[in-house]
Amino acid sequence: MIQLRTRQGSTLDQFFRITERGSTLGREVRGGITTFVAMSYIVLLNPLILSASADITGAKLSVEQVTTATALAAGVMTVLMGLVGNAPLALAAGLGVNGIVAFQMAPEMTWAQAFGLVVLEGFCIVLMAVSGVRERIINAIPAPLKVAITVGIGLYIALVGLVSAGFVTRVPDAAHSPVPVQLGVSGHLHGWPIAVFIFGLLLMIVLMARGVPGAVLISIGAATVLAIAANSVFHVENWGLVTPKVPDSVVAAPDFGLFGDIDLLGGFGSAGVVAATTFLFTLVLSGFFDAMGTITSVSDEAGLTRDGKVEGMGRILLVDGAGAIAGGVTGSAPNTVFLESAAGVGEGARTGLASVVTGGLFTLTLLFTPLAAVVPAQAAAPALVVIGGLMMTQIRRIPWGDTDFTIPVFLTAAVIPFTYSITNGIGAGLVSYVVLKVCKGRWREAGVLMSILAAIFVAYFGVGAFGGA
C-alpha cells in the first residue's frame, strides 16, 4: 500500500497539526474515505424519509431535490468542520430529527415553514455556542456521565450496525412476543446479505488485530465486491435500501430546487404557537444533546480530550449549530455530527483534514449520486459494530463503586441503545443523578446548571403525557 506522508512543518501539517496529533497524511485520507463510505447511505435514506410524507397542503418533496440538498449540506458543513473545527467529525442530515420534520412537522405546516423552523433551531444552537452556554453545559456534566455517554453510543452504533445488516431484526408480532428482537429472520441466519456482513466483520476483526493499515476500508471494499458478485450471480432481492450492482450511469445532474425555499415564522401561524414552539423545543433539545454526546465520545476516542474537555469545542459547536441552519436552507433537515465519524477515527483520523476529505467526497456525489448506491448496508455495517466495540472499552474508566454514579451511568449507557436516542439516554442519566443528590441532601454538589438541565429533561420527557403535543 502506498504510504502518504506530509513533511513535518509544512503548511498543511501546521494548519491541521497532523504530526502534533500523532497522525499522518495517509491516515487522514483513509479515515476521511472510511467515514464517507460508512455514512454515504444518508444520501439515499434521507430523501426516502422526507419524500414519504406530505405537508399540510398535500405536497410531497422531490427525491431528486432532497438528494441534492442532502449531499450539498453534508459536503459543505463537513469541509467547514475540518477547516474551522479541525476535528475528524462529519455532518449530514440527522436521523431521527429528519423523521420529526417529515412526520410530525410537515403535516401541520408547509415544507417551507418546516424548514424555516429548522433554520430557527440552528440559530438557537449557534447563539448558545457563541455565548459559551453550550460549552459550559457540556463541561458541567460529571466525567463519569460523559464516559457513560461514550459507552452508550458504542452500544448504540453497534446495534445500528447489527440491525442495518439484518443480523438482528424486529420480531414481526413484538406485542405478543417475550422479546422485541431476534437473530436474523425467524431466529436464523441465512442468505447472501448476512453472509456478506459476517465476511466483512470477520475480515475487519482479523485485519485490525494484525494491525493492517486501512483495515476498515479494505474490509468494506472487499465485502462490497463480494456483494456485487453474489447479487449478479444469484440475483438476491433482500439487500434492503441499497442493492449492490454496477450502476447503469455514473453521472446525474443535481437539482437545487429546494435551496432557499424557507418561511421562518409561517409555521407558528399554520400549526399554532404552542405546537410550533413544542416542535422547535424538541428540535433544539435533540440537536443539542445528540451532537454533544457524539462530539465528546468520538473526540475522546480520537484522543482530542484534555482534562475532560474537548480541544476546540467552541469552534466545533459553532459549526455543528450552523449545520442545522444549512439543513434548513438547503431543504435536507437539520445537519449534525454523525456517529459514523467514529469509523474514520478507528482508521486513524485525528484532524480536520479527514473531514475535508469526507466533505469533498460528499460534494462529488452531487454529480455521481449513482455511485452512492453501490455499497450495501451489509458491507458498511461491520465498521459500526467494530468501532462500537472499541468505544465500549471506555467502560473501565467508570467508578462503579461510587453509588452516586452507578445507576445514572447505567441508565445513560442503557437507555441510549434501547430507545435509539442519545438525547433520551443523557436525559435519563442527568435526571437520576440530580434526584440522587437531592435525596441524599447534597443538592449543592449537583450544581445549579445540572439542576436546570434535569428540570428541562423532565419537561421534555413529559411532553404529551398530559394532553400536550
Image: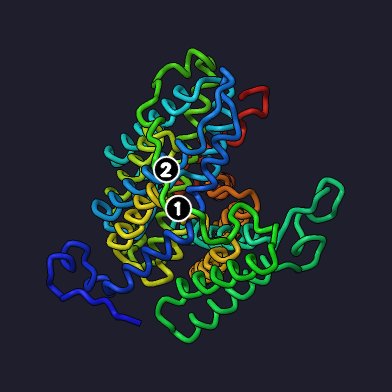
Residue reaching furthest bottom? 210
In percent of width and height, residue 155 lies at: 58, 62
Q: Which residue is mark 1?
A: 338
Element under disc 2: strand
Residue 335 is marked as 2
Mark 2 residue type: Asn
Element under disc 1: loop
Name the residue: 50% across, 82% down: 207
Q: Is residue 48 left or right of residue 19?
A: right
Viewer-side residue, 12 vs 157: 12
Mark 1 residue type: Phe
Q: CA distance from mark 2 to mark 1?
A: 9 Å
Viewer-side residue, 364 vs 253: 253
Would residue 316 be visible to someone looking at this image?
yes
Q: How is the image coloured?
A: rainbow
Q: Is residue 223 above or below residue 326?
A: below
